[in-house]
Image (cartoon, rainbow, N blue to C red):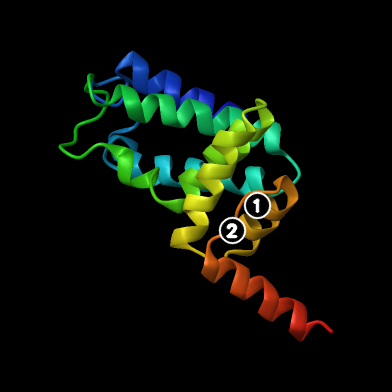
Amino acid sequence: MRAGVSNFVALARSGAYLAGDRRVSPGERTRWRFTFHDLVAGAEHALLADDFAAGATAMEQLIELACELRGYDYFRSEDPVAAALAGPELGFFAAQLAYQRGDVGLAHSLVTEALGKLPGHPKFLDFAVSIGAPLPARARQIIEQRQRAHR
């Protein structure tokens, strides 16, 4: 997965998705959003599985590329890929990364915000509880319901 992300990012930065570069087929040039989406999904899967380091590295590369799209044209498109990288899942990833880097306060606020949008998400809840983050009221209710159901 990491190699696939690195290759995609390198090709994008080199202009291969814009010009007639033989490393990227004409069909792939028009399907870059699908490739990007698949790479993000793979990185998210790695983050939620046991391969957090690989997932974090891949996601960082994809986020950096998405941020660069504000100033550079790497693809033929009017709409950058930010919508593949938004919402509570991005906040959850950022929370995990902040925690890994030792910024517990930021991790708490990011995972709490993600739980505000998806209060029943089991991975969000597990992570928030494991790092002692404050839980939104609805998330606390869901945890209590689950605990009662498992008694």
Q: Quadrant of the C terminus?
A: bottom right
Is residue 121 in sight in this rendering? yes
Residue 106 drawn above or below residue 83: above
Identify the residue at horizontal 49%, vertical 42% (top origin): 40
The residue pinned by badge 1 equals 128
Q: Amino acid at mark 2?
A: Leu
Q: Amino acid at mark 1?
A: Ala
Residue 102, how many percent across, how many down? 67, 27
Horizontal relation, residue 96 to residue 60: left or right? right
Horizontal relation, residue 109 to residue 16: left or right? right
Front residue of 100/148: it is 148
Tell me if label 2 and label 1 are in contact, CB under 8 Å: yes
The outermost residue toward the top is: 14
Q: Earlier in the sequence, mark 2 or mark 1?
A: 1
The residue pinned by badge 2 equals 135
Residue 1, how many percent across, how many down? 61, 35
Which quadrant would residue 96 be assigned to in this image? top right
Look at the numbered disc 2 and give the secondary structure of its residue. loop
Report the disc number at residue 56. none
Look at the numbered disc 1 and give the secondary structure of its residue. helix
